[in-house]
Image: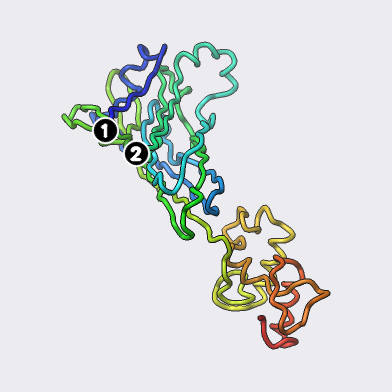
Amino acid sequence: MKTKKVVVGAIAATMLSLSVCPIAPAIAAGETVQISVSSAEVKAGEQFTVNVSLADVPSNGIQTLDFAISYDPKIVTIDRKKQERLQIPEQEAQMLQVHLQAQLFFESSIHKDLGEIDLVWTTGLKDSSYWISKDGVFCTITGTVASTAAEGAYTDLKVIPATRNATDEDGAAKNDSIACGYFKDKVKYSYEVKANNGKVSVKPAKIQPTLRGDADCDGQVKMNDAVLIMQSLSNGDRFGEDGTESTHIKALGVANGDVAGDPSSATVKRDKGGDGLSPLDALRIQEYLIHKIEELN
């Protein structure tokens, strides 16, 4: 395996002790930072985007952060990474633009052979107001699912130590830890890291319904299903298939809820839908619940 290197260029001198070397647990800071990767479900050949987020960032802040995200390169390819600006105090950034450019450092690299994305953020600034100091999205990752990926296939997106040769203070020949912490008075302080892994799943090209009318996928046909269909149509940002609410309609719910077709060709009892969700589907479910029709076929 080739040794991987992170090139720091002109700022190498100021960050030699921080840039790519894991922080040895000389002193445990006694706090835990969460690194989370979101999940996505798309069809084969489609693009996806996931967020890498930080939570429970301690009040002392983070001066250096070095970790990786692993994935299955047979399932997905990674197209790009975009760093978010959660760590830079914008009211001061313009005044110290030159200084910040010389001292703040974000590096990312994609290693397709390993199925790994390496992410490093560090700064040589001792002023903690320029460290990562709040929760939020650290970066976004965009990729594409292989066109040959089978329906139902998936790859975990795991938060791991970056794969590289790096002898640490314990004598390990390989990097075996996620660096997250800071330096103070030449002493290293290391936070614990809790990893919350994500996933990219391959969505079936066409989902088959499991129970006609069961839009909320609870195994029953009730008035709630008609309500959810109307919510998904009237407020798609919150309740649509990609909505933000935890109770938003799912892909299976869309398939289950599509019980009525074009009114001009409807046969009341035998109409099987197939034209997507509409208010007519909610009406048909209500007709079924009051026994105006006998079945949802």
| Closest to the observer, 40 or 273 | 273
Q: Which residue is mark 1?
A: 1
Scheme of image coloration: rainbow
Q: Earlier in the sequence, mark 2 or mark 1?
A: 1
Measure the C-alpha gap from mark 2 to mark 1.
Answer: 9 Å
Q: Which residue is mark 2?
A: 114
Residue 60 in sight from this viewpoint: no
SS for dot 1: loop
Amino acid type at mark 2: Leu
Query: Residue at position x 52%, y 38% from top?
Result: 140
In the rendered view of the protein, which quadrant contains the N terminus? top left
> In the picture shown, does residue 11 fall above or below 174?
above
Amino acid type at mark 1: Met
Give the quadrant of residue 154: bottom left
Left or right: 253 as drawn, with respect to 108: right
Give the quadrant of residue 161: top left
| Closest to the observer, 90 or 146 | 146
Q: Position of residue 40 (x, y in %)?
A: 51, 51
